Image (tube, rainbow, N blue to C red):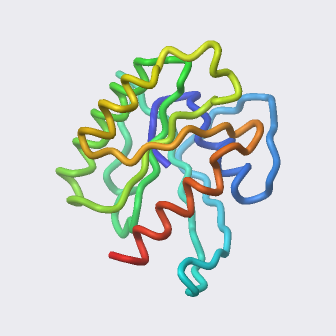
Amino acid sequence: MLGAFAVGKTSLVQQFTTSTFAPKYHTTVGVEVGKREMSVEGQDIDLLIWDIQGEDANQEISSGYLRGTAGIIFVADGTRKETLDTVTTISRRVQESIGPIPSVLLINKYDMSEEWEVDDVAIKQLNAQGWSTQKTSAKTGIGVDAAFEVLARDIVER
């Protein structure tokens, strides 16, 4: 899980692994690991999900966290368009560090869609650039399982 601070990475992992949402924000320091078993195309797999601390202008993600990565979920906050720029920057560094791997971009906080700064035009542009995008809400669970399933399927098919 990669993205800017406070986009909902930890909440998405929590929703995916335990079907819960904690409304109180807490900052991830370093990395937290979640796990969930699932079946993809008849194959049982264990997903180990590394929730890596957010990135901003003063804090870059260590490339050491990326070694051995099979896939990446990038997360942007639909209510803060600038978090898409952060994702783009992180994605570029990931490509330089470990090369192309399966990934999906989650535009999170869909439960607050009336406050979104990321519109459908921006999402269509991202898709045209090759991004696989999903609208999600860590709070309600909308799109969360489907997003992880898309990534897991891409990893298995690779």
Pinpoint residue 70: horizontal percent, then vertical percent: 39, 68
Residue 134 sits above or below residue 36 on the image: above
Q: Residue lying farthest left?
A: 96
Residue at horizontal 73 percent and vertical 45 percent from the top: 141
Identify the residue shown where x is 58% and y is 86%. Answer: 42
The picture places residue 54, in percent across and down from the top left corner, at 49, 35
The x and y percentages for residue 13 are: 65, 51
Looking at this view, is 4 or 124 the one in front? 124
- State the count of labels: 0
In the displayed structure, 88 sits above or below 20; it is above
- Between 66 and 157, the one lying in front of the other is 157
- Residue appearing at x 53%, y 46% in the figure: 30
The C terminus appears in which quarter of the rendering?
bottom left
Query: Residue 113 location in percent, x, y?
Result: 63, 21
> Seen in the image, is 113 located left or right of residue 31?
right
Q: Residue sitting at 32 percent across and 35 percent down?
A: 126
